[in-house]
Amino acid sequence: AARQGNGRSAREAPRIGFVTLGCPKNLVDSETMLGGLHRAGFAITSDLEEASLVVVNTCAFLTASQQESIDTILRVAQLKKTARLRKLVVTGCLPQRHGPSVLEELPEVDYLLGPGTLGEIADVARGLLADRLAPGARLGGLDGLEVEWEPRVISGHRHAAYLKISEGCNHTCTFCIIPRLRGRHRSRPMEEIEREAARMAAGGVGEITLVAQDSTAYGRDLYGKACLPELLARLDAVEGLRWIRVLYAYPSGLDERFLAALRDLPRVVPYLDIPVQHTSAAVLRRMRRPHRWSKTEAWLSRLRREVPGMVLRTTIITGFPGETEGDYEELLRATGDFEFDHLGVFAYSTEEGTPAARMPEAVPEELREQRRERLMLQQRAITLRRNRGRIGRRLEVLVDSVDPGTGLARGRWSGQALEIDGGVIISAPDPDSGARPPVSPGKYVGVRVRGAGPYDLVGSVEEGQCP
C-alpha cells in the first residue's frame, strides 16, 4: 500500500474534502489539486463530514463572490466542532487578493494557497495533518505554470470536462482584477494540452470545453502568434473526442483562421462564447476594451453566415461608471437587433483596486440593477423565440443525467454549454409501454424537439441520424 508521510497506510489515509467556487477555470484547479493529493496517497471524500482536512477553492472576482467565499469558509469551519474536520485550507483568488490578512480575519483557516502555489497542496496537507506546519500562507508564483497538470481527478460528469489552455491575462480592462489575481498570460504547450485531451478521451470524456482568461490569445507568449486554430486542429484529431467547445474568446481575437477552424473542423462545435461587455463606443473606451461593436458585429455576422448552425453567447455589464441613458438605449438596440442565442447580464460591481472604482459619474446601484433586469427581459424573449424556431428539428444531444424514478433525462445539444446554458429535457416513454428511454449519461442520441422554453428544449428520442 502507498505510505503517507505520517506512516498511515492508504486504507487509513486522512480523508480530504473539496469545495469549489467560481468559474470552470477554478474547477480545473481543484481537479488538479485532487490529482496531486491522490498521487500523494490521500483519500478523497465527497462527504465533508468525513474529512480530516477540507480545501475551499475560492473566487474573488466580484464583491458578491468574495462574500460567497467567506460564507462558505465559515460554514465549513463549523465542521471542526461537529464532525472530524481538523484543518481548513483556503486556496484560489481570495487569498491572492487579500494576502495573509485572511488568516487574521478568519482565524478558523489554517493555511492559504494562491493560484500560483496550488502545486504545494500535498506538502501543506501532510504538514498540517502531522501537526508540524503552523498556520501560514504561500502566495505569489504568478509568472509560470508550475502545477503538474496530470493526472487530474475529473469531478462531476465523467463524459464532459473542462481543459485549461492558458492562465492569466494581458488585458487591462478597467473593471477587472483578474491580472492581479492570476498574473500575465501564460500558455500551456500544445503537446501538453494534446496529451491531456487524449488521456481524458481514453477515460471516457467525449466533450472537452477549452477555458482560459482569453482563449483567442492562446500561444502568443510561446509561439509568437495566436495559435488557437492550430491547437483546435490538433485536438480535432484526438481519437475518442466528439465535441470540442471554446469559451472566453476575446473579440479582438477573431480572424480568418479561427473562423475556418469553427467552420471546417468536424469535432469543433459551432458554438462560441465571446464576452463583448457593451456596445457603446464611449463605454467600451472607459472599460479599456480595444474592440468596437461595429467590428465585432461584422465578425459575428460572418460566423453566422459561414458556419452552419453557429450559436453565439455573450456577457454584458450594465451601469458601468458614466453609462448614460443614451449608452444604455444603444446597448438595448444593438443586442435586440443582433439577437445573441445566449446572453448573460451583470450589474456593474465596484471592485476595490480597479481603475473603474475610482471613476466619477457612478451609476446608482438601483439603476444598474434596473438596467440589468430590462436587458434580461429583452433577451428572454429573444432566446424563447430562437428556441421555438428549433421545434420540429432533430438534434444530436449529449445525455448528462437520467432520473431513475421518472425516466426523464437531461442533456444538451451542441448549442448549449455545460453548466452555463439551458439544456434538453428528454421525455420518458409512455408508461404503459414498459419501455425505458435508450439513454444513459455520456451517450449521444437523436432527439426530436417537441417544445421550447426560454432556457430549455423538450424532446423525445428518435432513431436515425441527426442532421
Image (cartoon, rainbow, N blue to C red):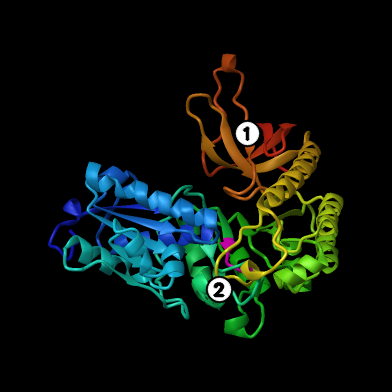
Task: Compare residues 344 and 67 and report the one nearer the observer.
Answer: 67
Q: Residue 179 carries which label?
A: 2
The vertical placement of 434 against 122, above or below, is above
Q: What stretch is highlighted in magenta?
A: 210-215
The vertical placement of 30 against 260, above or below, is above
Name the amino acid, label 2: Pro
Name the amino acid, label 1: Ile
Lower sequence index among marks 2 and 1: 2
Task: Compare residues 356 and 182 and report the one nearer the observer.
Answer: 356
The vertical placement of 9 against 382, above or below, is below
Residue 92 spot, x, y in % from top left: 43, 64
Residue 17 left/right relative to 7: right
Residue 162 spot, x, y in % from top left: 53, 58
Residue under circle 1?
A: 425
Q: Which element type, helix, strand or loop, lies under badge 2?
A: helix
Q: Which residue appears at 54% of the width and 25% of the height? A: 436
Residue 215 left/right relative to 383: left
Residue 92 left/right relative to 422: left
| Residue at the limit of the structure toward the bottom, as seen here | 224
Q: Which element type, helix, strand or loop, lies under badge 1?
A: strand
Q: Is residue 41 magenta?
A: no
Position of the C terminus by quadrant: top right
Residue 175 left/right relative to 165: right
Mark 1 crowdedness (10 Å alpha carbons): few <14, some 14-19, many ≥20:
many
Residue 47 spot, x, y in % from top left: 32, 43
The vertical placement of 424 against 418, above or below, is above
Residue 83 appears in the rendering: no
